[in-house]
Amino acid sequence: MILGVNVDHVATVRQARGGIEPQPLAAALLAIKGGADGITVHLREDRRHIQDGDLKLLKRKISVELNLEMAALNEMIEIALKVRPDMVTLVPEKRKELTTEGGLNLKTNKKKVEKAVDIIQGAGIPVSLFINPSITDVTLSKKTGAQMVEIHTGRYADSKGKKQNAEFKRVKESIKKALDIGLLVNAGHGLNFLNVKKIASIKGVRGLYIGHSIVSKSIFSGIENAVREMKRLIKDSSR
Ligand code: PXP
């Protein structure tokens, strides 16, 4: 099972100052050193974190799978065809949401998604559809011609106890259905150091896509050293 690391939030910190650091590419290279099998970025319509330049730079500099998350919009399709990531994950996108809130609605967006899948896969780039853990959505995904799906684990991650068990069951059954009908299956959203094990134990899953919890943990595993180095610089210079 591969791990794709989402580095959007490194760009979120950079954009907070509008400067050049921290660089998503630098984080991606360290993530790869740590064992990441892939790097994911979500190029949003409002460019709130990842910028077009980040995507181009990642494409040039990383050798692992580059997964571009994007909405099925003409602008994004053009970018995907130009940059040629290793795969595209189509996600729904609302300008006001804090993060991707739900999977694609394949009933209302069938034509739009089908067209995007057709163009992108037609250009030789595999497409994954980010969908809710539902048998209906898995079946509809297959009909679009997409090669892959990513099952949304957000509700599993956000719930507890019996409710979490029920959400887990939905995820597991959707994965099984997707495998049965010949789709490649990924999972992600909200996975962290506590809840990942159960999902990782599901057989047949191709990859997990994780961002927030890894970036959050990185702050705590790195802040002590960063402060120590700054203290040393101050001490050495103020003697
Ligand atoms: N998969 C998709 C389709 C996403 O949109 C996101 C969030 O950008 C993730 C996975 C990763 O979610 P998280 O940041 O909660 O780990």
Image (spheres, helix red, strand yellow):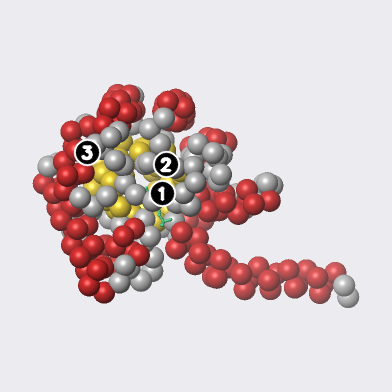
Tag 3's secondary structure? helix
Mark 2 Cβ inside 8 Å of ligand 1 = no
Q: Report the front residue among 65 and 174.
A: 174
Tag 2's secondary structure? loop
211 lies left or right of 9: left
N-terminal label among 1 and 3? 1
Q: Is residue 38 above or below residue 110?
A: below
Q: Report the front residue among 194 and 97.
A: 97
Q: Amino acid at mark 2?
A: Glu
Query: What residue appears at the point 45 percent right and 51 percent down from the top-left corner?
Result: 99
Could you tell me if residue 173 is visible in this image?
Answer: yes
Q: Report the front residue among 183 and 190.
A: 190
Check the image and name the residue furthest to the right. 239
Which residue position is annotated with label 2?
93
How far from the left and from the top, in percent, is residue 1? 27, 55
Query: What residue appears at the point 87 percent right and 72 percent down from the top-left corner?
Result: 238
Q: Residues within 10 Å of mark 1 (few under 14, many from 20)?
A: some
Q: Cβ–Cβ below 8 Å for labels 1 and 2? A: yes
Which residue position is annotated with label 1?
100
Mark 1 Cβ inside 8 Å of ligand 1 = yes
Which residue position is annotated with label 3?
141
